[in-house]
């Protein structure tokens, strides 16, 4: 009887214990740099902190020959503040709202094919 009770307590302890760490959980706040604020909303943004799925591990701007790592193009270029210039770092979160259509020119400028909808934060995200 005692062994059965101990076995029950052990089973309860194992199932009630939360996982030690969820290593696969994706961060919700990211630090980024505006690498190339190309014309007509064709921006290249690199992720500096955080693991973001959907970025391009390596991408070369065919016009300049410059190679970038961990980059994407914002799906919502009109949501990127005009004050963010090439080389500026900023923080963002993923934006799950519908991508707002905005008017911008149709001129071509090289940018990563990968598009991610983001919301720029005013400063470092809370908890960072």
Image (cartoon, rainbow, N blue to C red):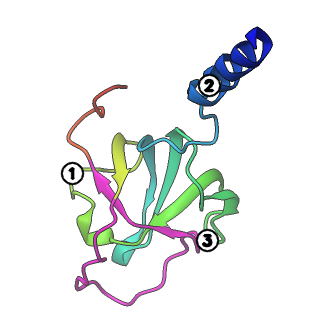
60 lies left or right of 108: right
Query: Residue at point 60% right, 27% down?
Result: 21
> On screen, 61 above or below 128?
below
* Disc 3 target residue: 63
The residue that disc 2 covers is 12
Which mark is first along the chain, 2 or 3?
2
Say whether residue 13 is magenta: no
Q: CA distance from mark 3 to mark 2?
A: 61 Å
Taking the view exactly as shown, the residue that stands out farthest to the bottom is 106
Mark 2 element type: helix
Q: Which residue is mark 1?
A: 83
Indicate left or right for 43 with 84 as reference.
right
User: Left of 118 or right of it: where is 50?
Assistant: right
Question: Measuring 34% from the left and 41% from the top, which residue is drawn there?
Answer: 90
* Residue 54 percent location from the top left of the image: 59, 62
Q: Residue furthest top?
A: 2
> Alpha-carbon distance for marks 2 and 1?
55 Å
- Of circles 3 and 2, which is in front? 2
Between label 3 and label 1, give the one nearer the viewer: 1
Q: Name the element at disc 1.
A: loop
When asked about the image quadrant of residue 6, the answer is: top right
Whichever of callouts 3 and 1 sits on the residue coming sooner in the sequence is 3
Residue 20 horizontal/vertical position (percent): 62, 23
* Up-down relation of residue 14 to residue 36 (above or below): above
Which residue sits at x=61%, y=29%? 19
| Cα distance between the residues tagged 3 and 1 | 24 Å
Q: Quadrant of the C terminus?
A: top left
Q: Nearer the viewer, residue 1 or 29?
A: 1
Q: Which region of the structure is painted magenta? A: 95-120
Instruction: State the SS at label 3.
Output: loop
For marks 2 and 1 on the same chain, the one whose residue lies earlier in the sequence? 2
Residue at x 33%, y 71% (from the top left corner):
76
């Amino acid at each position: 009887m005692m062994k059965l009770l101990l076995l029950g307590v052990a089973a309860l302890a194992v199932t009630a214990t939360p996982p030690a760490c969820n290593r696969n959980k994706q961060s919700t706040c990211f630090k980024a740099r505006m690498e190339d604020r190309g014309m007509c909303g064709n921006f290249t943004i690199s992720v500096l902190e955080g693991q973001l799925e959907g970025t391009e591990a390596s991408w070369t701007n065919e016009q300049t020959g410059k190679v970038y790592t961990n980059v994407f193009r914002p799906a919502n270029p009109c949501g990127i503040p005009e004050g963010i210039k090439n080389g500026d770092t900023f923080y963002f979160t993923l934006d799950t709202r519908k991508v707002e259509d905005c008017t911008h020119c149709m001129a071509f400028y090289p940018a990563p094919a990968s598009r991610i909808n983001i919301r720029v934060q005013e400063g470092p995200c809370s908890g960072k």
